[in-house]
Amino acid sequence: MIQPSVAVADQNTLEDPLAHLPCSTIVGYLKGQFIYDQDQPSTGIYLVINGRVKVARLANDGRQTIVDIYQTDDFFGESALLGLRRRPERATALEDIKLMAWTAAQIHDLAQMRPRLAIALLQIVVQRSLEYAHRIESFSMDSTGCRLARTLIRFSHRLGAAEPDGWYRMPPFTHELLAQYVGTSREIVSHYMNEFRRQGYLRYSRKGIVLFREAFNEWLCRTSTHAVEVGVPLRVGGTQSSERAS
């Protein structure tokens, strides 16, 4: 069974790349604007100053699979360091954002002068590789509902804020975006989201998603990855989650 916990590296052992990078020019992008895509690929790495960025892989038929959502102090665009001429990847501003960027050539020169910068960037890549391995394992073993639950748990860790009653508030995500991350259709995500809401695991609106993370974690821990269904009743401390949500 795949463990539902989100792997978090020991911050005491991680190098901070910002400690080794000089300031660069800050550039703004409007909501929906492409930062780079396969026709105009990234030429360097980016740091999110504020806002959120979606990075997705593009299939030949135009469908997208989301790599991740990046927010303030996150780096993205590291594939530029490979120097490939064509990369089927697109970065899109999910809201008005500000970014700082360094070209691949600048990173190469800085890494030679500051080896700890190279270690910091390598740690970021390795940590993301571990997260991608967990996603691949989930794709091969989990039901769609379980994958969606894992996605919401992960987003609550990365993008959410804790509330006093144990719920976690996240920004609004369209069902289309969640489908692109989970690897399914918008209609199936809408079905599961409605079921999750009906059973009291979450609340959502155009203002955001509020998730009862403990309920999802307990559900994932006690249910076989091959038998996870939205209709499985869940009780936390003897009280059904729907009662907690009311």
Image: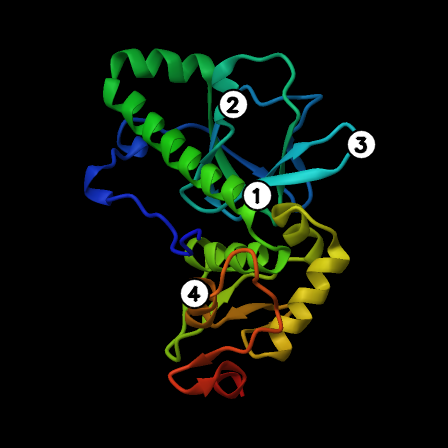
Badge 4 is on which residue?
217
Label for residue 61?
3
Measure how far apart labels 1 and 3 are at the Cα level: 23 Å
Q: Residues within 10 Å of mark 3 (few under 14, many from 20)?
A: few
Label for residue 79?
2
Colouring scheme applied when the structure was drawn = rainbow
Residue farthest to the right?
A: 61
What is the three-letter code of the residue carrying label 3? Asp
> From the viewer's perspective, is the residue at label 4 or at label 1 nearer?
1
Residue 189 drawn above or below residue 238: above
Measure how far apart labels 1 and 2 are at the Cα level: 25 Å
Which mark sits nearer the N-terminus, 2 or 4? 2
> From the viewer's perspective, is the residue at label 1 or at label 2 nearer?
1
> From the viewer's perspective, is the residue at label 1 or at label 3 nearer?
1
Callout 1: SS? helix
Callout 4: SS? helix
Image coordinates of residue 73 in percent, x first then y, are: 40, 42
Which mark sits nearer the N-terminus, 1 or 2? 2
Q: Is residue 94 visible?
A: no
Residue depicted at 56% across the width and 52% down the height: 142
Image coordinates of residue 220 in percent, x first then y, are: 47, 63
Measure how far apart labels 2 and 3 are at the Cα level: 22 Å
> Pointers 2 and 3 in contact (CB under 8 A)?
no
Callout 3: SS? loop
Measure how far apart labels 2 and 4 are at the Cα level: 33 Å
What is the three-letter code of the residue carrying label 1? Ser
Q: Is residue 48 left or right of residue 144?
A: left
Q: Is residue 216 left or right of residue 111?
A: right
> Pointers 2 and 4 in contact (CB under 8 A)?
no
Residue 233 drawn above or below residue 107: below
Residue depicted at 39% across the width and 52% down the height: 6
Asked whether 216 or 16 is in front, the reply is 216
